[in-house]
Image (spheres, rainbow, N blue to C red):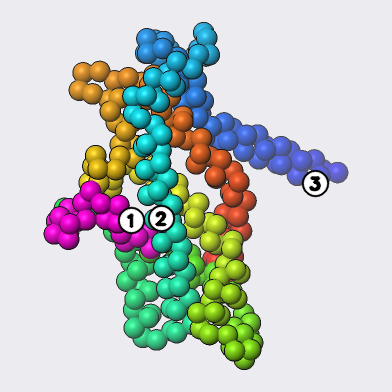
Amino acid sequence: METRSRTSSATLLLEIAGVLVALLFLGPFYFLIVNSFKKLKDILLNAASLPETWAITNFKKAWVAIDFPVVFMNSVIITSISVLALVVISSMMAYRLVRRPTMFNKLLLTVLVAAMIIPFQSVMLPLMRITSLFELRGELYGIVLCYMGFGISLSMFLYHGFIKSVPLEIEEAAVVDGCSPYGVFWRIVFPLLKPITVTVMILNVLWIWNDYLLPVLVINDAMTTIPLAVQKFFGQYLRKWDLAMAALTLSTIPVVIFFLLLQKHIIEGITAGSVKG
C-alpha cells in the first residue's frame, strides 16, 4: 500500500509539473492571440489583460497593410518547393550512403554531419558573395538552393538513421522480381520512410516558414514572405504592435494546423531513426 501511495504521489507531481510546463510554453500563444484583438494603447498599458472588446479591426488593417494574400502565397511557394526538394534529395542521398558504405561515402557523411554545427552567422558574408556571383539574389531558385544547402545535413542525418532499420531482404526480393534501382527506392523503400518523412517535413516547414534572416539576405523585396512583411510594422520611431500581432496570428494559423495534423509522427520518426539505427 505504501509503495502504491508513493507511486501515486510521484505520478501526481509529474502530472502537475507537466501541466505547468505546458502552460509555460502556451504563454506566448496567449499573448499573441490576446494582443491581436487590442488597440495599441491597451497593449502598451497592460499586455497580459484580456481585451475589452474582441474586434477584428486589427486583422483587417494588417491584411491590407502587408497585402497578406500575396505574401502568404510567397511563403507557401518557397516553403513547399524547399521542403519537397529537401525530402527528395536527402532521402535519396541517405539511402545511397547507407547501402553503399564506401570510404568516400563515409567521409561525405562525416562532412555533412559536421556541417550541422556551423553557425549561420559565420557564413553570412560568403553567402552574400556567392549569391551575388551566381545571380541567385532575388530569385525563387536562389532561396530554394540556399534552404537546401542549410537544411540537407539534418534531413539526411534523420533519414540515414531510419533507413538502417529497413530490412535489406525486402530490396533483394524486389530486385529478383525485376525492379530497377530507382524502382526499389521509390516503390519499396520510400513508402516505408513515411514516419521520418513526416518528421523531416514538419521540422523544415517550421524552420522555413518562420525564417527571417535568410530571406532578407537573399530575396529582399523581390518575393516578400510573411516574416519580412511583418517587419514593416516596426519602424524607427513607431512600432505597431497591434497590427503586428494580428499579422503574426494570421501567419501562425496554417503552420499550427499543419503541425497538429502531423505531430504524432514526430516522436515515432525520431525514435525509430535513433534507436533502431
Q: Residues within 10 Å of mark 1 (few under 14, many from 20)?
A: many
Circle 3 residue:
3
- Please tell me the numbered disc located at residue 81: 2
Determine the main secondary structure of the stretch shown in magenta.
Answer: helix
Marks 1 and 2, how far apart in space? 7 Å
Does the CB distance between marks 3 and 1 fall below 8 Å? no
Q: Which residues make up the magenta segment?
A: 127-152
For image coordinates 17% across by 61% down, the residue present is: 134
Question: Tag 1: residue type?
Answer: Val
Does the CB distance between marks 1 and 2 fall below 8 Å? yes
Q: Residue furthest right?
A: 1
Circle 1 residue:
144
- Which comes sooner in the sequence, label 3 or label 1? 3
Q: Which of labels 3 and 1 is toward the front?
A: 1
Q: Is residue 265 visible?
A: yes
Q: Position of residue 156 (x, y in %)?
A: 43, 67
Q: Residues within 10 Å of mark 2 (few under 14, many from 20)?
A: some
Using the image, determine if residue 255 lies above or below residue 196. above
Q: Position of residue 186 (x, y in %)?
A: 54, 73
Q: Considering the numbered disc 1 on the image, is that residue within a helix, a strand or a loop?
A: helix
Q: Position of residue 173 (x, y in %)?
A: 64, 87
Left or right: residue 257 versus residue 240 is right
Using the image, determine if residue 270 lies above or below residue 245. below
For image coordinates 44% across by 34% down, the residue present is: 251
